[in-house]
Image (cartoon, grey):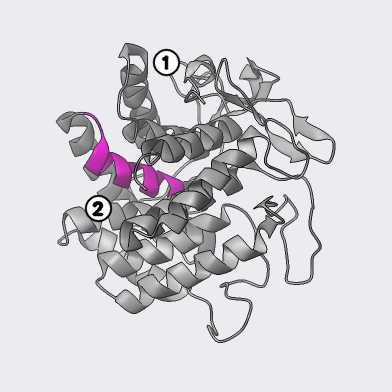
Amino acid sequence: MIKPPLTHLKELSTSIGLYEHARIDVPRKGHGYCVDDVSRGLILLCHEPELDDETEVLVDVYLEFVLRAIEPDGSCHNRMDGAGNWHDDASTSDWWGRAVWALGVAAVHAPNQEQRSRSVEGFRTLTRASTFDLMSLTFAALGAGEVFIADNKEVGAEKILRAASTRLLPADQSKPWKWPEDRLRYSNGSIAQAVMLTGIALNQPQITETGIRMLEFLLETETRQDHFSVTPVGGRGPDDQKPAFDQQPIELAAIAGACVQAWLITKDSRWLEEIERAWGWFLGLNDAGALMYVPETGGGYDGLQLLGPNLNQGAESTISMLTTAQHAFRLASAG
């Protein structure tokens, strides 16, 4: 199987940012851009082993977009219209966390020193703010962990990790439902990954072990027969039946990311198998037996329905597919 190309990602991108939505494979320009997706795109490209001239330019475009979204107090805008104007109030909701994540990754992994330096500056501004929201803190911890491992004098990163070390853990770890909320929501694997990374960054092995147990619980909950049957848009509680739809590609990207983290910690090959299984979901190992992307262009379908995919190829789904593939192909020979 050939690694998906970045063709559709480039088609969704402009000199401003990355269009959020598409009708089939055509960008819906009227819907504009958002920090959520541009942050995902920046993380993806910072982890790409080889960039061509076009994608090297996109690293600068995406980085500039995220930096423009940040207010001096550390809050962050999310939505920009097609003309380049913000049309929301800055806050510390999910997109703030994703901006922290993206700039944390770029601060360590961006292709050149100038990009890394600008990312550190933006990261420090963002960490003037804080949040108690579970998902926003989850995403922020993933960026803070990267920065703090690279430099344990970064006080903003430590502040986020200290908050994550309590907020993201299950309240009662002896209960069968090993999760910090009563229902799974979205990007669930990111929570387990953030807990593992927090434990590593703060040198607290018990937190790292808790993250691994959370991931094991999640994989059991998200599996049906031999394949992933992930949380649908409406969430999933302890008594919900499988399968359920609309399943989102971001769930597989989050699972794959968490399994990469678990493999880096344990070097246990079972995590490599789970990464392959997450990639298999896009290849048709799912509840509908449907291919979930376009191999020729690298466009990712927007969700799995009972009868097959939603054929729209928006930014979140495309990047989620590309991210899962990136993990699978990067670690294909590691076992």
Which element type, helix, strand or loop, lies under badge 2? helix
Amino acid type at mark 1 = Ser
Which element type, helix, strand or loop, lies under badge 1? loop
Q: Nearer the viewer, residue 9 or 225?
A: 225
Tag 2 residue: 147
Examine the rendered structure and indicate whether residue 289 appears above or below residue 145.
Answer: above
Whether tag 2 and tag 1 are in contact, CB under 8 A, the answer is no
Residue 112 lies, in percent from the top left, at 19, 29
Residue 290 lies, in percent from the top left, at 73, 33
Q: Which residues are magenta?
A: 98-111
Residue 308 lies, in percent from the top left, at 79, 33
Does residue 79 appear in the picture of this structure? no
Badge 2: how crowded within 10 Å, few (<14), some, or many (20+)?
many
Amino acid type at mark 2 = Val
Which callout, 2 or 1, points at the residue further toward the start of the chain? Answer: 1
Choose top left, top right, bottom left or bottom right for residue 44: top left
Residue at screen point 28% across, 42% down = 122
Q: Is residue 279 left or right of residue 42?
A: right
Examine the rendered structure and indicate whether residue 81 appears above or below residue 129.
Answer: above
Choose top left, top right, bottom left or bottom right for residue 172: bottom right
Does residue 201 appear in the picture of this structure? yes
The stretch drawn in magenta includes residue 215: no
Residue at screen point 44% across, 69% down = 211
Badge 1: how crowded within 10 Å, few (<14), some, or many (20+)?
few
Q: Is residue 222 left or right of residue 48?
A: right
Q: Is residue 21 left or right of residue 173?
A: right
Tag 1 residue: 15
**Number of callouts in the render?**
2
Residue at screen point 31% across, 20% down = 56
